[in-house]
Image (spheres, grey):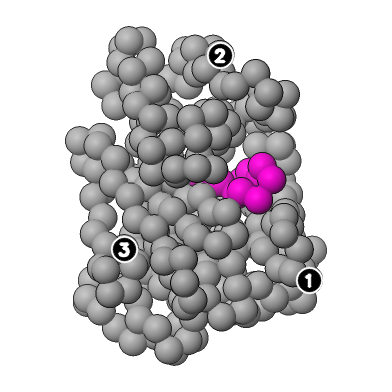
Amino acid sequence: MCRWLAYTGSPILLKAALISPAHSLIDQSLHARLGAEPTNGDGFGIGWYDQHPEPGLFRSIEPAWNDQNLREVAGHITSGHFFAHIRAAIGSAVQQTNCHPFRHGLWLFMHNGYIADFPAVKRDLVLAVDESLYPEIAGQADTEVLFHLALTFGLMNDPPDAVARTIGLVDQVGRRKGARFPFQGTIATTDGQRMWTFGTRARGSLARSSSPSTSPRSASCTQSARSFTSSTRTHVSSCLSRSAIFRAPGTRCPNPTTGWWAAARTPCIPSQ
């Protein structure tokens, strides 16, 4: 399974969130102490927004900890709104087209988790993708199918409804094929102005959180098969072991162990 990070706030160099912290996402890609596996070495990706309307995208099949190009890029790109993802493949090939985040126009989309028995349900799910979107599916990953289903169901107009309909279809098809828990995971998506995050609760129901549309913005994170809570004061959810947010200096972050704590250029990444 994968790990991801989302940031929104005052513009910073990407390396301030991805590389510099003691337990940064890049550090976790090599030797994480929490999670099903200690490494996420099957590729990575970053997507960021700047002065251009469409987000930039850099994806690679290299392990994140061993890619000098990532360090160069992260040390020179400044953004106030970006996604990062490190991959541990489950079933699909280690190739660039399977690396997150995925992009469509102004939108980015990434995922941690899996669709149960994906080879068995893939055909039914792909056939539900809008005909105009189908040619854009370039890889094999279940996440890319989720993204294009969400786009089909109106992601650009109503993200919560589109994702709910997507997971509802996955659940329906999966259960018909005999899966007990057809979907488990977390999803993050953004149009460059707002971020939405979704995660499955312990019994498979969908929970969500979103960042406010006015500055300063905030991102949120969730963990598969765990419910998450959202504070209306901070618009963030508890940072759990596989997904993380990074907030701008002067804001506050939730700590799953000790409660709320003040952040001063400190990432909302769980202690490892």
The label nearer to you, 1 versus 2, is: 2
Q: Is residue 209 above or below residue 248?
A: above
- Main SS of the magenta part reads strand
Is residue 52 visible in the rendered image? The answer is yes
Residue 113 image point, x, y percent: 43, 40
* Label number found at residue 127: 2
Q: Give the residue at x 77% y 76%.
A: 76
The label nearer to you, 1 versus 3, is: 3
Is residue 182 visible in the rendered image? The answer is no
Q: Which quadrant holds the C terminus?
A: bottom left
The label nearer to you, 3 versus 2, is: 2
| Horizontal relation, residue 69 to residue 74: left or right | right
Which label's residue is closer to the chain start, 1 or 3? Answer: 1
Amino acid type at circle 2 is: Leu
- Badge count: 3
* Label number found at residue 72: 1
Amino acid type at circle 1 is: Glu
Q: Give the residue at x 66% y 57%.
A: 47
Front residue of 149 and 17: 149
Query: What is the C-alpha distance between the residues marked 1 and 2?
Result: 40 Å
Q: Which region of the structure is painted magenta?
A: 99-112
For label 3, the residue is 237
Front residue of 64 and 218: 218
Residue 39 image point, x, y percent: 52, 52
